[in-house]
Amino acid sequence: MFWDKVAGVYDLFVNVVNRKCHKDLCAYVEGLFNSCDQVLECGCGTGMLTKHIAGNCKTITATDFSEKMLIRARKNCTKFTNVTCEWADITDLKYDDNSFDKAVAANVIHLLEDPKATLKGLERVCRNGGELIIPTYVNREKKGKDNIFSKMFAKAGAGFKRQFSFDSYKEFIRDCGYSDADFKLIGGKMPCAVAVIRVKKSVE
């Protein structure tokens, strides 16, 4: 698996290559949580966001599809007692309905065959009134063409299924039925757009 192969060097991309984007992303995202939140994180990677969320929430279940990424995440989060790292498939979540206050899936939506179904799965495991926080890499070009980094990832075996610009990402989220989502663009060599979606479930 591609992500198992790059687990050992992924922090280099996070902390050096795309440092400004990831630093600003962490600063923005950590402010979206409070001490009462029970959080699910999907695609936690080596724990870049996990570390920042953990200090601001009650508990965080940090998951990834790559076992080697999880090994790195556990190592990077050892000082936090409220972090549980475990394997999960974001496209087939086994958690019960309404298990979490907030769900985070960072830089993974663009890699999926059916991202709309994945968003609905994240919504299912969140409680009414909670939030989905979905940062995703976007291209600088308005047309959403491949940038140099997405081309590099594709050649290495992690091709993007979708190429979003900031505008097309907003359109995609709204087309998924989330018309009142909030958005934030984080600049950098490989920019990131954050969608904050409020979970609204009908009460029977």
Image (cartoon, helix red, strand yellow):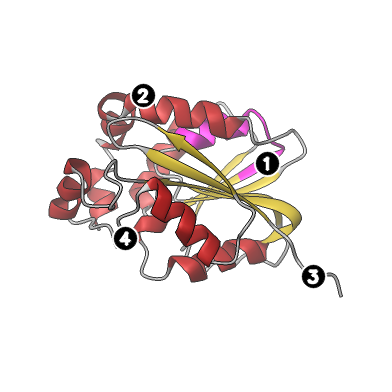
Q: Is residue 107 above or below residue 191?
A: below
Q: Position of residue 155 (x, y in %)?
A: 12, 53
Could you tell me how far apart the alpha carbons at marks 4 and 3 are, in whole angstroms?
31 Å
Spatial CA span between label 1 and label 3? 26 Å
Residue linked to disc 1: 59
- Mark 1 falls on what kind of element? strand
Looking at the image, is mark 2 or mark 4 earlier in the sequence?
2
* Residue depth check, mark 1 versus mark 2: number of the one nearer the observer: 2
Q: Earlier in the sequence, mark 4 or mark 1?
A: 1
Q: CA distance from mark 3 to mark 2?
A: 40 Å
Label 4, label 1: how far apart the Cα atoms are: 32 Å
165 or 107: nearer the viewer: 165
Identify the residue at horizontal 35%, vertical 37% (top origin): 191
Residue at 26%, 44% (x, y): give it: 141
Please report the residue visible at 53 percent of the width from the left and 26 percent of the height from the top: 27
Q: Which residue is mark 3?
A: 202
Name the residue carrying label 4: 162
In the rendered image, which quarter contains the C terminus?
A: bottom right
Kind of residue at badge 2: Lys
Which residues lie in the magenta part? 48-60
Rounded to the nearest angstrom, the CA distance separating label 2 from label 4 is: 23 Å
Compared across the picture, whether 35 is left or right of 136 comes to right
**Marks 1 and 2 close (CB-CB < 8 Å):** no
Q: Are marks 4 and 3 in contact (CB under 8 Å)?
A: no
